[in-house]
Amino acid sequence: MSTPTAPADHGLQAIPADTVSLSDYERHAQARMTASAWAYLQGGAGDEHTVQANAQAWQALHLVPRVLRRTAGGHTRTQLFGRTLAHPLIVAPVAYQHLMHPEGELDTALAAAAQEAGFVLSTQSSTRLEDIGDAIAADDLRGPLWMQLYLQPDRGFTKALVHRAEAAGFEAIVLTVDAPTSGVRDRERRAGFCLPPGVSAVNLQGMTPPPTAEVPAHGSALFDGLLHHAPTWDDIAWLRAQTRLPIVLKGVLHADDARQALGLGVQGLIVSNHGGRTLDTVLPTARALPRIADAVGADMPVLVDGGIRRGTDVLKALALGARAVLIGRPCMHALATAGALGVAHGIRLLRDELEAAMALTGCATLSDIHPGLIDRD
Ligand SMILES: Cc1cc2nc3c(=O)[nH]c(=O)nc-3n(C[C@H](O)[C@H](O)[C@H](O)COP(=O)(O)O)c2cc1C
């Protein structure tokens, strides 16, 4: 006789009643996570100046609303890579989401799809990419489904990974270029963070580890070892030849790099400093964005992430030239607090805030959002 099984718990924990903004999720998540996992999630490189500066740079921009404009019938729709998106919010790639919740990336992806938001799966996902594809690829209403890629030393494995992503229904490859080596994340090191049993980069299983480089006596483990495998511009051409999917470079901050990408058949850029996790004191993304948008003009969509916490931040990003924005840690706070329900609610909160910010600045559509809404003094 078969035993009835309990219905799968797809993260239907209750959302605490006082949760009205993404910062409320941050508070609730900290109370639910281990100190070590919290240090991994929240921490940044060095003294975390860039982590702070990212959020502060959006806050420091002042809006100058227009009044008495007709906004009834407005909407948040936008176009990206030939698709119409309901709104410009995308969940950023974040590694090892089983640290935050037992359902990990699956809950985040289901929530993003339910809210018509984009979802980017990390190379270091703790859920198989095929399981994400099976869960949401066929959903007609979902937003973009993209695969983030760290080029692996084993290029044959990298190619196979890209082809698996294509077969699973992913629609773009987001190549992260700002982390040829891991940032030195002091908070995480002080907490002694290491992955708990059962949480691993499952999509990288079976990869042949690179031959260990002979580091000469008094040599550098970095320059004489690891960096022999770091990607360079030559690899962009290699990757372009491996996939039919659009390639989006994530982690561009310099206008010259943006122009170089344009010449190499890259289809989009994400202005990002990895949420302040790679190199401390790097330029906040709100400051880098206008330079990159100017450098590529209308030739390529530019997206941005880092410190975006409010609908007003999203509006400012669009005013400075972004087509869409990615949200990292806040989605993880919502995941840790209330699973899929929390992530869906968190995305909805941000979308509602964006709509309110549009109405209060006189913008009926995203194309009404322009640089003149931001004070220049
Ligand atoms: C815990 C954590 C893990 C991350 N893992 C990845 C990753 O695997 N690949 C990647 O390209 N970016 C990764 N990021 C960076 C995010 O994609 C994104 O750039 C950043 O979180 C945006 O800043 P925000 O957290 O302030 O929104 C990670 C960020 C965090 C917080």
Image (cartoon, rainbow, N blue to C red):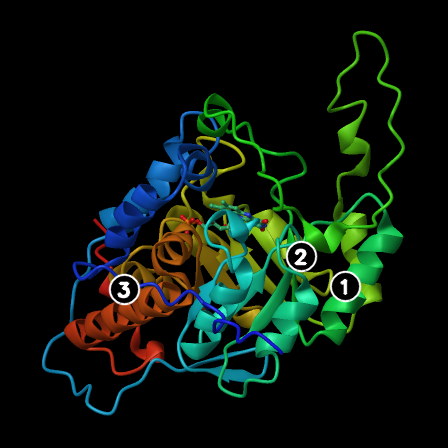
Left or right, 356 with reference to 202:
left
Q: Quadrant of residue 167?
A: bottom right
Residue 59 visible at all:
yes
Q: Nearer the viewer, mark 1 or mark 2?
A: 1
* Gap in angstroms between the C-alphas marked 2 and 3: 30 Å
Residue 131 x/y as whole percent: 65, 69
Residue 323 x/y as whole percent: 45, 69
The residue at the point 36 percent across, 79 percent down is: 367
Mark 2: which amino acid? Ala
Task: Give the labeled residue for mark 2.
Answer: 261
Question: Quadrant location of the N terminus?
Answer: bottom right
Left or right, 97 with reference to 152:
left
Left or right, 122 with reference to 245:
left
Task: Give the labeled residue for mark 3.
Answer: 311
Residue at the left extreme of this rendering: 68
The residue at the point 31 percent across, 71 percent down is: 348
Residue 212 is labelled as none
Toward the viewer: 240 or 211?
211
| Mark earlier in primary sequence (3, 1) | 1
